[in-house]
Amino acid sequence: MSQTPRTRTVIGCTLLLAALGATASGCSSDGNPLSSDPYDAADQIAFNGPRDEGTKADPDKPLVITAEKSDGRITDVTAKDATGRFVAGELSADGTRWHSTSPLAANARYTVRVSTEDEDGAPGRKVLAFDTSRPTSKKPLTVTFGPKAGKYGVGQPVTAELSRPVKDKKQRAIVERGLRVTSTPAVQGTWYWVDDKQLHFRPKEYWPTGATIRVRSDLEGVRISDRMRGGRAKPLTLTTGDKVVAVTDASAHQLTLYRNGEEVRSVPVTTGKTGFETRNGVKVVLGKEYFVRMRSTSIGIAAGSSESYDLPVYYATRVTWSGEYVHAAPWSVGSQGAANVSHGCVGMSTANAQWFFDTVREGDVVKVVNSEGDTMDPFGNGFGDWNLSWKKWREGSALVAGTPDGPGPAERARLRPQNV
């Protein structure tokens, strides 16, 4: 927000002191007013906050700071609360007025540092402090982050579940701005509004290996609408392991697992037959179950029909909520590597299924190519987030949709690495 100081005529120290009054600091030996210590700018500015400790500011009103004298101007304003949350704002081109553009939090303590200069370019400084009143909303908007804390594969999205629906675009922007994701190493990423109460965050590319991801909400006390303010949210920390990507080629009947870009192993498999084709696209490991009883009725096949089944299944790695797994299928070993005979799952020998089960973790990437099936849906049946292009993903954000590709202000803030 600072502007380049205007070119000034250097004046002598005696004249400068007379101009600034008793509050001015001594000049340096070169007589340049820009080299003097900042003077107290209390009489040069005004703000609309409370004047005494017993009064609290209305958090629903923007903070406004103005230059009171025609011979001076504001050069910079920094405002933040006791938790370190900064208030965004705009400074007029002539330096006469600054106002906040992001909402203040309720029941918060703010410190505002104002920098000024007089007509001779001498710097002034004033620090203001005030409290905001308590919120009146009885039902705050709370946020629950997911998944649970732990170590995940590089394909794991971060989720945010809101306690109340948010439909208005401007309100969504306030919410999204307050949901902070920082990563070491830093990444470019953004949130996507899945619906009125659910958001997903993913980077442009998969997470880096060995990353530490911290998620928090800065919404506590922040006004979102006339009847809604942000509430508390428990922060979340995740880490990532190696980049593990398993590619199933349905036409070649092979699954090949790569770790950090290098092929580890390729095994024969069978995928969905005609009418039950395995979904194409990128999926993310949702969980692992040593034993699952699979029944055809769970996918709409009537009991007693020629396609019905009821089987005990071992080493089952889940990739969709509707029941698609990578699992042991000893009954189809003769077809594995040669034909697709399953009802949509990726089947392999028991030994290979155990190896796969022991190798992958939640968040690892499972990709199916060359299947006749539809592409995995982005949402609602697991994590198909990566099946959206980065351009489409950005369109789901309330902050960066419609802007040129590349990090905007909110994304640049997220790109700053977090110290660990």
Image (tube, helix red, strand yellow):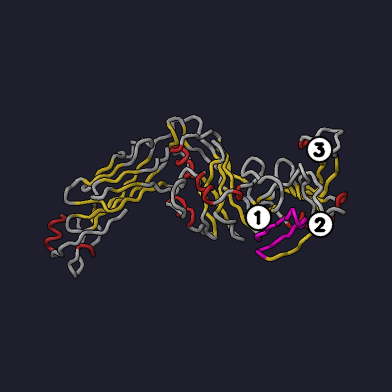
Expressed as whole percent of the image width and height from the top left, the position of residue 408 reads 44, 52
Amino acid found under the numbered disc labelled 3: Ser
Amino acid found under the numbered disc labelled 1: Gly
**The C terminus lies in quadrant:** bottom right
What secondary structure is the stretch in magenta mostly built from?
A: strand
Mark 3 or 1, nearer chain start? 1
Residue bearing the label numbered 1: 153
> Helix, strand or loop at disc 1?
loop
Taking the image as shown, residue 308 lies to the left or right of residue 37, namely right
> Residue drawn at (51%, 57%), measured in percent from left and top?
418
Crowding at label 3, few (<14), some or many (≥20) Cα neighbours within 10 Å? some
Crowding at label 2, few (<14), some or many (≥20) Cα neighbours within 10 Å? some
Q: Which mark is residue 337?
A: 2
Foreground mark, 3 or 2, reads 2
Q: Which mark is residue 296?
A: 3
Whole-number angstrom distance, CA of label 3 to CA of label 1 = 30 Å
